Image (spheres, rainbow, N blue to C red):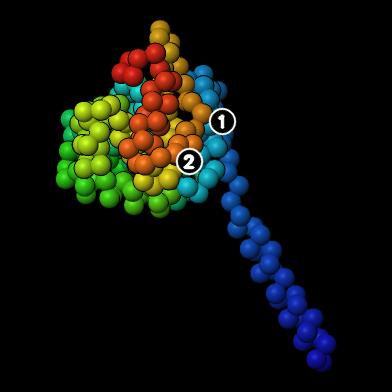
Amino acid sequence: MGKLNFLLAEDYIKPKIYFHSKQQNIFDASYSSSDRSQFEGLEHLTQLLRSSTGFIVNAFQVDYYQTLPRLIAKTLKENKMHKRIYVLGPELSLSILKRSSKTVYEKHFQEFGYINIEQAYDNVLKQCLALLKEGHILYVLPEASICWNPEPLIQFKNKFTPLCSTLLSQEANVPILSSSTKENNDKFILHEPNMPQQYIGDLESRIEQQSDAIYSLLESPFSE
């Protein structure tokens, strides 16, 4: 009887072992042919989405239809991931994007978070760092670096024009995925992730190096 109880107990334990192995989520980046025709470098996005670490998207192009954020939100939803995407920008830009979302892409509207950088600067910085450390994604609009001046960036203004995404990258130790468009080409280019660990020195030096590296992806830092 003791042996029978042991065998029954062993059979009872086995399904638990199998159950845990089935809990491992397999990330499926099932991009459509339309996605592939709109984007170059999707493998870089896939690399970051597969990671549990948060990351920053540094957008150099104006995209009122939120093409890249919608693709990210769709992929997260399909894979039932805990990550969420937050669009970071000034109030006017966010208002325009929200109106566009409500009229054309209403079903995606609740899938984005929006962060107004014109609120208390230091509070916004704390909120962004907390979201990144939780594994979420920040999509930084191109005008954000002009409008947002948290304390750590103010001291750099007379020396160089820093990207606010680099401050977030250095402080949260997360990568930056930069997106841009080629001249006379509507296709979005997703560049290789820029890692904060590549840079050395104090915070100012690292922000300057990383900003220069990201600006170098473009012929002009502010080209659309």
User: How far apart in space, not on screen, are marks 1 and 2 (Cα)?
Assistant: 21 Å
Residue furthest to the front: 201
Report the number of discs. 2
Q: Quick one: 30 or 195, which is closer to the camera? A: 195
Q: Amino acid at mark 2?
A: Gln
Left or right, 181 with reference to 102: right
Task: Residue at 53% x, 31% y: name it.
Answer: 44
Q: What residue type is disc 1 on?
A: Glu
Identify residue for label 2. 197
SS under mark 2: helix
Q: Is residue 38 left or right of residue 18?
A: left
Q: Mark yes or no: residue 171 visible.
A: yes
- The quadrant where residue 23 appears: bottom right
In the rendering, at what x and y percent does residue 46 appear?
Answer: 54, 36
In this view, 109 is above or below 179 = below
| Tag nearer the camera, 1 or 2 | 2
Residue 208: % across, % down: 35, 31
Q: In the picture, which quadrant includes the N terminus?
A: bottom right
Task: Please state which of residues 66 and 161 is positioned toward the viewer in this rendering.
Answer: 161
In the image, 119 versus 152, the foreground residue is 152
- Single out the residue that lies furthest toward the top: 184
Q: Which residue is mark 1?
A: 43
Give the residue at x 40% y 51%. 133
**Residue 52 vertical position relative to residue 195 in the rendered view, above or below:** below
